Image (cartoon, rainbow, N blue to C red):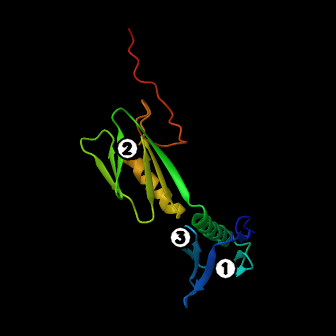
């Protein structure tokens, strides 16, 4: 049995959950909380039911290898949605480099990161960015979109290994390389 999938998901107070299914057998879990609302589609073969203050996900054959994997995935997706509408998710990025800077203009990040022109990045719906000096904090209720947005911003100017210039995650460690050594 899937160790992750068989764990029930606890529903905190202030969170409403509805399990909807259509005529084709597709199941969708609607999660509504203090920070917003999310809909999570559950893969085929996994069923969901709400009992008391818990959501329990099940599969027809818990010993089938592919069903175990999908079972754990479905439980994690629903749990991430529940945690997102209660607490939210955040990623922090740091910009390193001489003259590198970032500014927030409405729903747009303007990055000056060593190119001949400033790079503008439009923030997706549901994502909030905060800029303080050379740090960017990306936050939202959907874990996947927060991570994707942070990865796209980092990809604009990845940190290089010689001086460490570029955009990196706050907790990321850049392995440094030695530059060329001139022999006398």
User: Residue drawn at (24%, 44%), measured in percent from left and top?
Assistant: 117
Residue 28 lies in what quarter of the image?
A: bottom right
Q: Which residue is mark 2?
A: 157
User: Residue drawn at (54%, 88%), measured in percent from left and top?
Assistant: 24
- Are the residues at dot 2 and dot 1 in contact (C-beta closer than 8 Å)? no
For the N terminus, the quadrant is bottom right
Q: Tell me how many marks there are.
A: 3
Residue 135 locus on image (x, y percent): 45, 43
Residue 25 locus on image (x, y percent): 58, 86
Left or right: 69 with respect to 167? Answer: right
Residue 11 locus on image (x, y percent): 69, 71
* Residue 21 appears anywhere in the view: yes
Which secondary structure, mark 3? strand
* Residue 43 appears anywhere in the view: no
Report the Cα–Cα distance between label 1 and label 3.
Answer: 21 Å
Q: Nearer the viewer, residue 128 or 6?
A: 128
- Are the residues at dot 1 and dot 3 in contact (C-beta closer than 8 Å)? no
Left or right: 157 with respect to 73? Answer: left
For the C terminus, the quadrant is top left
Q: Which residue is mark 3?
A: 36
Report the Cα–Cα distance between label 3 and label 2.
Answer: 32 Å
171 above or below 105?
above
Residue that lies at the very extreme toward the bottom in this rendered image: 23
């Amino acid at each position: 049995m899937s160790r992750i999938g068989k764990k029930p998901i606890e529903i905190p107070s202030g969170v409403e959950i509805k399990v909807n299914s259509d005529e084709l057998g597709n199941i969708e879990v609607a999660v509504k909380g203090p920070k917003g609302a999310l809909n999570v589609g559950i893969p085929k073969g996994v069923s969901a039911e709400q009992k008391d203050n818990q959501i329990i996900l099940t599969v027809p054959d818990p010993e089938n290898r592919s069903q175990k994997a999908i079972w754990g995935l479905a439980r994690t997706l629903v749990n991430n949605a529940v945690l997102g509408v209660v607490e939210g998710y955040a990623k922090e990025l740091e910009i390193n480099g001489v003259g590198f800077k970032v500014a927030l203009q409405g729903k747009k990040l303007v990055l000056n990161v060593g190119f001949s022109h400033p790079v503008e990045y439009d923030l997706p719906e549901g994502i909030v960015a905060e800029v303080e000096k050379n740090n960017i904090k990306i936050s939202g209720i959907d874990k996947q979109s927060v991570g994707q947005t942070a990865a796209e911003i980092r990809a604009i100017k990845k940190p290089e290994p010689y001086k460490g210039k570029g955009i990196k995650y706050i907790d990321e460690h850049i392995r440094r390389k030695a530059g060329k050594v001139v022999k006398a």
